[in-house]
Amino acid sequence: MEFDPALLAEKEVYKLLSGSVVPRPIAWVSTVSDDGEPNLAPFSFFNVASRNPPMLSISIGPGVGEREGTEKDTLVNIRSQKEFVINVAPVFLGNEMQKSAGNFPSAVNEFDAAGVTPIDSTIVKPKRVMEAPIQMECLLEKIIPLGTDHLIIGKMVRYHIKEEYYLGNYKINLDQLQPLGRLAGNFSENKDFFTLPR
C-alpha cells in the first residue's frame, strides 16, 4: 500500500506517523507561567538534538478538545520564561504521567492533579518531579514553528539522577529505569534489552 500525505486528513497522517515512529520516549515537561503557576505535561515527540552542547528537542502541537485553536500552556510558558525541565517517566509513574496530560485550565497545578511532588531545580525556575529518576534542567535555545507544531530546542544545563539508577562511568541502569514509551495510542514497557547480532 502507498499513501500520499497531501491527500489525507491531518488526523490520518498523524495515525500513520505515531504508529510507525515507535517506541517514542516521553518528555514529562515542567514549566512555570508568568504568574508563577506550575505546569506539568507529557510529550512523546521528544529526542536528543545535539550532544555538544547537550540539547534536547520536544515538539508541541496545538490545543485539542475544548482548547482547540489555542496554544498549550507548556509552549506559552517556555516562550515566556525560556526555561523548562524534562523529567523521565518510568513505568511505575505511568498513571501519574497520564493524569497530568488532562486538558486542565491554566490555573490548575498538574503536580497536584497527578499526585507528584515538586522540588526546586538548581538553575531554572520550573520545579522538578521528585519521584522521577532522571530530571534535566533546560534553557530555551530556540523555538521553530513547523506547520501546526512548534519544535522547541533546549540546552541542558543540569542533569539529575537518583543514585540507584546510576551505574557509574556516566551510564544509566536501563533495567532499573524501565523507561515508558509511546506506541500510537498505547504505551510500551522497555525491558528485556539485548545486543545485535543475537
Image (spheres, rainbow, N blue to C red):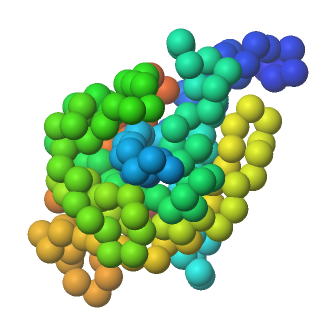
Q: Residue furthest front?
A: 35
Q: Which residue is more in the foreground, 82 or 42?
A: 82
The residue drawn where x is 19% and y is 57% is: 130
Q: Residue furthest left?
A: 164
- Counting from the top left corner in percent of width and height, residue 45 is at 55, 43
The residue drawn where x is 32% and y is 82% is: 170
Q: Quadrant of residue 111?
A: top left
- Counting from the top left corner in percent of width and height, residue 190 is at 30, 46
Image quadrant in which the C terminus is located: bottom left
- Counting from the top left corner in percent of width and height, residue 39 is at 39, 43
Q: Quadrant of residue 133?
A: bottom left
Q: Which residue is more in the foreground, 15 or 70?
A: 70
50 vs 30, left or right, is right
120 vs 147, left or right, is left
Q: How many numbered circles are shown?
A: 0
Examine the rendering and report whether any part of residue 103 can be seen. yes
- Counting from the top left corner in percent of width and height, residue 49 is at 61, 64
Examine the rendering and report whether any part of residue 194 can be seen. no
Q: Which residue is more in the foreground, 165 or 104?
A: 104
The residue drawn where x is 77% and y is 45% is: 145
Image quadrant in which the N terminus is located: top right
Q: Compared with residue 52, is residue 25 higher up or lower down, i.e. above or below?
A: above
48 vs 36, left or right, is right
